[in-house]
């Protein structure tokens, strides 16, 4: 009986605790990982190669603070410029631009779920999952003829999970890009 009590004491005393110490934004590193990967892949999935050699002005639109703090908006802008330049597009903010790219960030967010077993006190199993989703719409306009030349949509989701066993063993980390749904 003493051995059973000792084994239970050892199993019940341990606890896996995660303390967030990060930048002033208050956003966890896991949330930043899935959001930045989703944003990067969503921009990379857009094809601007047919505008190679053209001068393009950029406008970035978000949904009223959905991207959060200014650094996230600057990340989206810098990733977009990098992708355009690698596609051969000349980025311009001058009056001599031939084209205008309007990039709308329709969705940019993270869902967090946690699962425990048993539900009240996670003695055996615990996991926390982070699903980041970014949905973009790009529209390229010809500034001289005032017409739409190209419209593209891109939606990317990433899932990141951390697992703990017996409140002591872990974390076991895993990240994957989720496949596109059939509705897209």
Image (tube, rainbow, N blue to C red):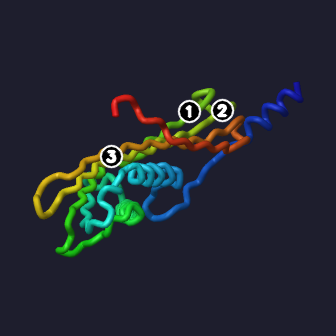
Which of the pair 127/123 is nearer the observer? Answer: 127
Residue at 67% x, 39% y: name it: 164
User: Circles 2 and 1: CB distance less than 8 Å?
Assistant: yes
First in sequence, mark 2 or 1: give its number: 1
Which of the pair 15/131 is nearer the observer? Answer: 131
Alpha carbon distance from label 3 to label 1: 25 Å
- Identify the image quadrant of residue 16: top right
**Element class at badge 1:** strand
- Depicted 153 relative to depicted 12: above or below: below
Where does the image place residue 138, in percent across and percent down from the top left?
27, 51
Alpha carbon distance from label 2 to label 1: 8 Å
Where does the image place residue 82, in percent across and percent down from the top left?
41, 65
Where does the image place residue 77, in percent across and percent down from the top left?
35, 63
Alpha carbon distance from label 3 to label 2: 32 Å
Location of the N terminus (image quadrant): top right
Mark 3 or mark 1, whichever is nearer to me: 3
Mark 3 or mark 2, whichever is nearer to me: 3
Residue at 45% x, 64% y: name it: 24
First in sequence, mark 3 or 1: give its number: 3
Q: Which residue is mark 1?
A: 115
**Element class at badge 3:** strand
Q: Which residue is mark 3?
A: 107
**Element class at badge 2:** strand
Which of the pair 171/145 is nearer the observer? Answer: 145
- Depicted 28 relative to depicted 164: above or below: below
Which of the pair 107/10 is nearer the observer? Answer: 107
Q: Which residue is mark 2?
A: 125
């Amino acid at each position: 009986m003493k051995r059973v009590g000792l084994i239970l004491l050892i199993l019940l005393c341990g606890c896996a605790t995660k303390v967030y110490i990060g930048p002033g934004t208050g956003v966890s590193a896991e949330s930043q990982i899935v959001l930045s990967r989703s944003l990067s892949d969503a921009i990379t999935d857009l094809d601007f190669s047919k505008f190679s050699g053209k001068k393009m002005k950029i406008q970035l639109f978000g949904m009223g603070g959905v991207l959060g703090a200014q650094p996230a908006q600057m990340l989206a802008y810098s990733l977009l410029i990098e992708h355009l330049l690698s596609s051969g597009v000349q980025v311009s903010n001058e009056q001599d631009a031939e084209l205008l790219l309007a990039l709308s960030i329709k969705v940019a967010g993270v869902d967090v779920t946690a699962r425990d077993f048993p539900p009240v006190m996670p003695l055996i199993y615990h996991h926390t999952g982070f699903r980041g989703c970014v949905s973009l719409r790009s529209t390229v306009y010809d500034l001289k003829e005032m017409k739409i030349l190209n419209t593209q949509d891109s939606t990317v989701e990433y899932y990141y999970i951390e697992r703990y066993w017996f409140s002591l063993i872990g974390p076991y980390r895993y990240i994957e890009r989720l496949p596109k749904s059939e509705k897209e």
